[in-house]
Image (cartoon, rainbow, N blue to C red):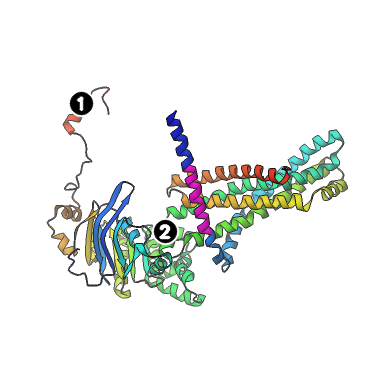
Amino acid sequence: MPDTPIAENNPLVQIRGLRFARGERMIFDGVDIDIPRGKITAIMGPSGTGKTTLLRLIGGQLRPLAGSIVVDGQPVPQLKRAALYQLRKRMGMLFQSGALLTDLDVFDNVAFPLREHTKLPETLIRDLVLMKLQAVGLRGARHLMASELSGGMARRVALARAIALDPMMIMYDEPFTGQDPISLGTIVQLIHALNEALGLTSIIVSHDVHETAAIADYIYVLSGGKVIGHGTPEELARSDSPWVRQFMQGLADGPVPFHYPAADYAEELLNNKPGAAP
Amino acid sequence: MINRLQTLGRWGLIRFERLGRGSMFLMQVLAGLPALLLRPRLTLQQVYATGVLSLVIIIVSGLFVGMVLGLQGYNTLVDFGAEESLGVLVALSLVRELGPVIAALLFAGRAGSALTAEIGLMKATEQLSAMEMMAVDPLARVVAPRLLGGFIAMPLLAAMFSAVGVFGGYFVGVGLLGVDDGSFWSQMQAKVNLQEDIMNGVIKSVVFGFVVTWIAVFEGYDAVPTSEGISRATTRTVVNSSLAVLGLDFVMTALMFGGF
């Protein structure tokens, strides 16, 4: 059990002994994570460590091999479909691409969860959608189609859609990747502001160290299927673990080697005879 | 030898596994159908997308197929002095066979491939995943209306194809080749049976509509979510549904008209 100093007695998400594999490859091998309520918690790690997979496990889209995932007191992998869908209504998720429905415009995209799950009159839905769009600064873009939006705008619309049902938590999948500096700043600020204003719990999955460290209250660093370090951004910056230091400071060589495993360099160059294997 | 057997076995296993998955998928989609009754707009949109948007190709093809039938039929019948029966020949060929079959093949190429590509792209761009996370079942919200829409649209398209084809045959036979107007229609009226010919044709087109749409939505939903995967799935939709239509057509024709 992680000795998280800020974890309260009742974290919103509690993961214990999580194991998950894709085919032969072990993605998680005994992962323990606590996501405290009302905070921004970041899950960081190099590409391919299964950070997105972790979000899908929390959302119940994948089932773990072993271990428990408890969200707001409910064991996600054991939930029946109806209960899982009820729980998901209280979870928002922001996909990396935004995942807006391409046959709908911005307004209808944000209205989608409201129309699917509530029987609110259309006038009320209009007001709610405009409020959500105002929060992300795109009220004026409500008539644009999803394909007409830039990547940053699409993510903001998706964020408005994610908060449409006033969820208790939002999971962000790589929210900073591939953004220009302005929209990057906008999104960093939005995540922070929404978390404060709406009293949300946020989980950010990312490998962008600076942006994430700027707003996260607590960070878990994953690598090789395990949590290799966790703490507040300040604690991690001071960490003496070579793994964590290599990741947080972006060093090319370290415990994660710069070179892909290969035979001895000098030997390979000297053995360069015609007809030898390339 | 053993290797070949192994390959054959693996091929067979993969086919059966896919068939099994396709059937389970169908069951899950069918479970979403009752909810659609409350929201007919979703289905109507799909009838428009699969049906109305396929009208041009169906009408043009129907016209040409009818005209060719008129031409070929006349040249054969005139040798026996039976060109007055041209109307019967054109109408029966269309209503029993060519209407349902060619309309289904065109439907697979026009609407089926579009369905697969659309659903495959929704999967690749995480739209289906996002729906799941919004607690909306994509099978009920996306796939079920498309299945029902295609199922409704296809028999209507086949009927349209046959009707336009008869006029094509009329245009060539009566208009250009001089077959008697009255006998063209009266023989057709006398010899085409509502129960045996038209109903059987309708049954065929209903079955084809169901099978083609099922294959199309399943291939889309099951596609590997990459551009290459989607292009493969689209090809598979057209190939598999065309083969299924032709195979089923033989089976149904044998049962309906084979005298077994």
**Looking at the image, is B92 positioned above or below residue A4?**
above
Is residue B175 visible to us here? no
Please indicate whether residue A250 sits to the left or right of residue B119 in the image.
left
* Pointer 2 chain: B
Q: Amino acid at mark 1?
A: Asn
Q: Is residue B149 magenta?
A: no
Could you tell me which secondary element the residue under label 2 belongs to? helix
* Pointer 1 chain: A
- Observer-nearest of B161 and A12: A12
In the image, residue B224 lies at what x, y percent?
43, 48
Instruction: Determine the image quadrant of residue B39.
Output: bottom right
Residue drawn 49% across the image and 44% down it: B16
Q: Residue furthest top?
A: A274
In the image, residue B211 lies at what x, y percent?
59, 50
Range of magenta residues: B14-29
Residue drawn 44% across the image and 66% down it: A141
- Observer-nearest of A126 and A11: A11
Q: Residue furthest front?
A: B260
According to the picture, the residue beneath numbered tag 1 turns out to be A271
According to the picture, the residue beneath numbered tag 2 turns out to be B129
Residue drawn 27% across the image and 71% down it: A37
Q: Amino acid at mark 2?
A: Ser
Q: Residue furthest left?
A: A240
In the image, residue B182 lies at what x, y percent?
87, 48
Q: Is residue B24 magenta?
A: yes
Please indicate whether residue A87 sits to the left or right of residue B74 in the image.
left
